[in-house]
Image (cartoon, coloured by chain):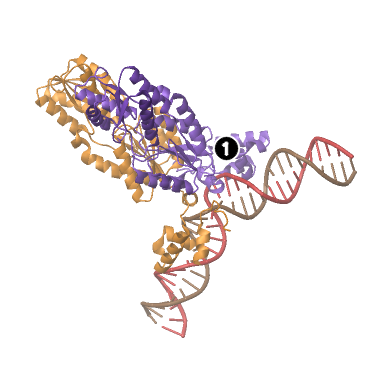
Chain colours: A purple, B orange, C red, D brown
Amino acid sequence: MARREGRRTAPTIKVVAAAAGVSTSTVSRVFSHPHRLKESTVAHVTEVASRLGYKPSHTARALSTGRLGMIAVVVPDIANPFFPPVIRAAQAHAATGGVSTVVGDTDENPVKELDLLAELERRTDGVVLVSSRLPEQQVREVAGRGHPLVLVNRDVPGVPRILVDSAPGIREAVDHLAGLGHRHLAYISGPAGSWSDAQRRDAVRERCAALGVTATVLRPHRPEHDEGRAAAAEVLDTGATAAIAFDDGLAQGALAGMAERGVRVPAEISIVGCDDILAATTYPPLTTVHGRGGEAGRSPSSC
Amino acid sequence: MARREGRRTAPTIKVVAAAAGVSTSTVSRVFSHPHRLKESTVAHVTEVASRLGYKPSHTARALSTGRLGMIAVVVPDIANPFFPPVIRAAQAHAATGGVSTVVGDTDENPVKELDLLAELERRTDGVVLVSSRLPEQQVREVAGRGHPLVLVNRDVPGVPRILVDSAPGIREAVDHLAGLGHRHLAYISGPAGSWSDAQRRDAVRERCAALGVTATVLRPHRPEHDEGRAAAAEVLDTGATAAIAFDDGLAQGALAGMAERGVRVPAEISIVGCDDILAATTYPPLTTVHGRGGEAGRSPSSC
DNA sequence: ACTTGACGTGCAACCGGTTGCACGCAACCA
DNA sequence: TGGTTGCGTGCAACCGGTTGCACGTCAAGT
C-alpha cells in the first residue's frame, strides 16, 4: 500500500550535496559562481539537483547575501494606461538579472505612498518610484534612508532619476494647433505635484507665448476619464477653441464631455492628448526609461 | 570633526540584547510571544529597541519560521474596476495579521498566470487567485503543489474557493427587463474560462426560459470598454431590444458603441451591466468575499 | 521544613544558504 | 628533485532570528 503523499518538504542544499557526493559549499557554488568549479562537477551537481527538484531558497540566500532578489515599482495608479508599459519594461529588465518585481499602487495618495515605501524598503533591494506625488522634502527624506531609490518623472536634486522629456511633443502639438488657426487654447492640468504636468504646462505656456497664442491653464485634475469630462465644461468656459490635456485619460474624458454637451470634435473644438496619442512624445525616450529604470532600481547604488 | 554618517547598518537583535542586558532569546520573544515574558521586561526591551530603531528582519524570521509574512493576490487585470476592491479588502485583512500583500496581474493571459503563480509560490505564504483563466486541470496541478491557494470566483473540486453569487442579481435584471416589455435579450459574454461568466450566462438563459423570453448569447469578450463597443454591433445584429453585459466595463463600452451608431439608450435599446451598477448583486457577498479571501489566503491551510 | 509546580529567562541548536581561508593535488619551473 | 603556483574543493563561521529544553527562583501545598 503506497504511503500517502505527505507534504514533501522541499530539498535543501544538504540533501543535494549528499546525493551528489560533494560538500554543501560546492552545491552552493554551482548555483552562484559556477565558473569557479570544474565543468564536470557543475554538470553532475546540476543533474542531481534538477532530478531532486531542488530550487535555492530566496530567503536563505537573502539572509547571507543581504540581497532579496526583488525590486519594487511604485506608481500612482496602475489603471492609468501610462504606467503598465513602464512596469512591464522594468519587470522585463529585472528578470534578465534573476530579479523579480512587485508593483505598488499608491492610489494617487501621498500618505499611502509614504507607507508603501516604508514597507517596500524592508521587502526589496530597491524601488523605482514613478511619478511620485510626495512633496520634495519627503522624497528627500525617503532617499536619505539609504535604501536604493530611483525616481521616474520627478526631479529632486541629489536623487537619481529618469525623466521623460515630453516638452518637444507638447510643442509640436501647440504648433500643430496654431497651424490650424487656433488663437486660444486651454491646457487641462494633470495631478498637483506631478513633475510631468509642470513640464507640459510650461511647454504650453512658453510655446503659446512664442506664437502669440493665448493660453489658459485649467486647475489640476486627477488623470481620469471622469475628470476629463468635467474639464470639458471648463474648457468651453474659457472660450478656447482647442485644448491640450495632460494625458490621454483626461483627453478622452474631455472628448466624452464635449459629446455630452453636443459639441462636435474636431469641428467646433480640437482636443489633444498626451502619452499614448502623441506616440512620438514617448516612444523612444520611454523605451530608454524602462531599461534604465529597471537597471537603476536593481543596482545597490549609493544614494 | 564628526565622522561622516556611514551607511549605518540596521541594529540586530544582538545589539538590542546587549543594550538591554538580556539574552537574544528574550528580545526575540518580546517581538513574537510577549505574553510569555514579565511585563516589566517587555516594557524595558521595547523601550531600548525603539530607541535603537530596531525592526525585526523579515528575512531572518522567515528562515526559521518558514513564514514570509506576505501573501499574493492575483487578478487578470488590475485596471478592471472589479478587482481593486477585492485587493484592497484582502490587503486590509492581511494587514491586521501583520501580513503584507503583493498583487499580481496576469493580463488575462493563462501562460503569464502560470509563470506568475510559480514565482509567487516561492515568495509568499499563500496566494489568492481571483477569477483564474486557467483550465481546470492546471488549477488542480497548481493547487497540488502544496502551496496554500484560495480561488475566488472559480470552482474546482477539492480546491478551497470563495464564490460571489451573482445569479440573483442577474435574475432580477432579467425580470426587470421582461417587466419593461422586452421579449428578446442578448447576453454579452465575458472572458472565456471565467466562472462568473458561466454563472451569469446560465442565469440569463434559465430565467429567460422561465419567462418565455428569447435569449441570445454572444461570443466571449475581454472585459474591456473597447470590446463592449464592438459588442454593440453584435447586439443590434441579433435583433434583441435589451442586453445584459458580463460586467460594467463591457456595458459602458456597449453604451458608447450604441451612441456611435446613433442608437439611443434606453429609448431604443436597454443595456444592463454587472458588478458595479447592480450594486445589490455584489454589495453584501463581496464584503464577505474580501474578508474570507484575505483570511484564507493567509492561513497555511491544507490543500 | 521539604516537595512540587509554575513562571521567567538563558543556552544552544537550528533554519538554508554563502564565503574566507586552508588544504591537497597536479602541472610547472629551475 | 625540491619549490612554486594555482586550481578545485571542503571546513566552519556567519547571516538574524526562533524555539525546545533546562535551570533557577519563588510561592503554594502538605
Query: Which image quarter holds the N terminus of chain A?
Result: top left
| Residue at the image position 56 percent from the left and 35 percent from the top | A50
Q: Report crowding for label 1: few under 14, some 14 to 19, many 20 or more residues within 10 A (C-alpha).
A: many
> Is B239 placed above or below B211 here?
above
Q: Position of residue A16 (x, y in %)?
A: 58, 41
Which residue sits at x=49%, y=46%? A147
Above or below residue B49? Residue A106 is: above
Q: Chain of mark 1?
A: A
Nearest the eye: B248 or C12: B248
Residue A80 position, x and y percent, is: 34, 32
Image coordinates for residue A74, horizontal then vertical, percent:
41, 39
Q: Nearer the viewer, residue A75 or A235?
A: A235
Residue that label 1 marks: A49
Query: Which x, y percent locates residue B122?
Result: 46, 40
Q: Taking C9 as reference, is A175 above or below it?
A: above
Is residue B293 among the parts visible in the rendering?
no
- At label 1, the amino acid type is Ala
